[in-house]
Amino acid sequence: MSSAPRYTPYRPRRLRTTARMRRLVAETRLHPADLVLPLFVKEGLDEPHPISSMPGVVQHTLDTLPDAVRAAAVAGIGGVMLFGIPTERDATGSQADAEDGILNRAITIARDAARSPDLRSDERPGPVVMADTCLDEFTDHGHCGVLTPPGPDGLTRVDNDATLERYTAMALTQADAGAEVVAPSGMMDGQVAAIRDALDDAGHHDVSILAYSAKYASAFYGPFREAVDSTLSGDRRTYQMDAANAREGLREADLDLAEGADMVMVKPAGSSLDVLAAVAERSDVPVAAYQVSGEYAMIEAAAAQGWIDRRGAVLESVLGIKRAGADIILTYWALDIAEWIS
Ligand code: PBG
């Protein structure tokens, strides 16, 4: 005869009794190959320059970039996403599609480092080399596109179609430099179709497009502005999405899929998990999420104060993004995570 009272036959806690059991039943696992490490490369630096709002993240020089890429390779990281910071900026972002522009030089150097034969194994073939395809680091006004002349109201706007011409030139230069993935992040209408067309015309059929599809105008990009020495005054609300809108994010993703995106992205990850889950549900291509600079800075700052457990908070935040449906996660913690989970 049973002695204990039986209040319920349903006891989900059984599967939480031991660490072994919890590991067995875990529904979601992080793997280094799913992670992409963003890397900043700045022209004219003699040595890596720390980004104060992103402790542990630096602006690299062209000389320190190969080691960063090799570290990613050794850790089994899936990809690196390159951002370039030029010394010269102008209205149209000329350095973006200059062959010897900082980002394009960085792409070639990263590609060579990623392919160094001494590092590669079947299990760790080196990271895929991806490049940000956007003008904001290259324009003197800091916007993601070129501006119209002032209208009757005296205001300038970001000119969508003129910007597409700059993006296609930029994507072609990046592909020529050795980018395996170009990542248009400017939220111009038609950017994926325009870039696909230009790449195909030039014979770059194998260069993939990772489309920043649902990219919200976000306060969480704050530290990134320091990371790229941004000159922007004002905001990007006429092209990046309003955080109030989920349905519109799905429309953006659908358009990018129809335009031929090879992968789609939702950003920022942590405050857009609903959109991420919905995009993952309808996408038939891999879905990426970008855990952005502000998400990084918040956890680092709280951890530095001793207010939060750094490792626990980092792993939980990234696991949540994966659980919501991300196949690929861009995170500044990619190397730490790879070390913790290996
Ligand atoms: C634009 C771009 C931004 C980020 C990635 N690509 C900044 C912006 O849109 O204002 C932000 C990434 C981050 O905050 O980590 N090229």
Image (cartoon, helix red, strand yellow):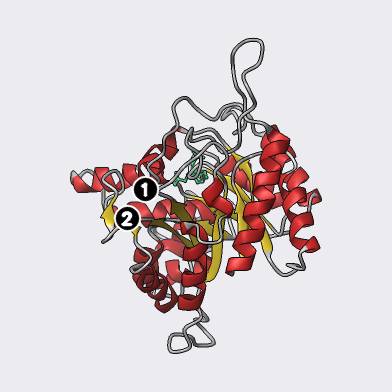
Q: Considering only vertical position in the picture, is 249 above or below 196?
A: above
Q: Amino acid at mark 1?
A: Tyr
- In this rendered view, identify the residue nearer to me: 31 or 238: 238
Q: Considering only vertical position in the picture, is 20 above or below 287?
A: below
Q: At numbered mark 2, what does the secondary structure look like: helix, strand or loop? A: loop
> Which residue sits at x=43%, y=66%?
22
Q: Amino acid at mark 2?
A: Val
Q: Are marks 1 and 2 in contact (CB under 8 Å)?
A: yes
Q: Considering only vertical position in the picture, is 268 above or below 210?
A: above
Q: Please identify the quadrant where the C terminus is shown.
A: bottom left
- In this rendered view, identify the residue nearer to me: 106 or 263: 106
Q: Please identify the quadrant where the N terminus is shown.
A: bottom left
> x%, y% of residue 36?
49, 62
> Which residue sits at x=38%, y=67%?
65
> CB at mark 1 closer than 8 A to ligand 1?
yes
Distance (Cα) linking label 1 and label 2: 10 Å
Residue 50 shown left or right of residue 267 in the figure? left
Q: Which residue is mark 2?
A: 57
Q: Which mark is residue 36?
A: none
> Which residue sits at x=48%, y=51%?
320
Question: Which residue extends farthest left?
Answer: 305
Q: At numbered mark 1, what does the secondary structure look like: helix, strand or loop? A: helix
- In this rendered view, identify the residue nearer to me: 10 or 71: 71
> x%, y% of residue 129?
54, 67
Q: Which residue is mark 1?
A: 296
Q: Which marked residue is nearer to the observer: mark 1 or mark 2?
A: 2
> x%, y% of residue 188?
67, 38
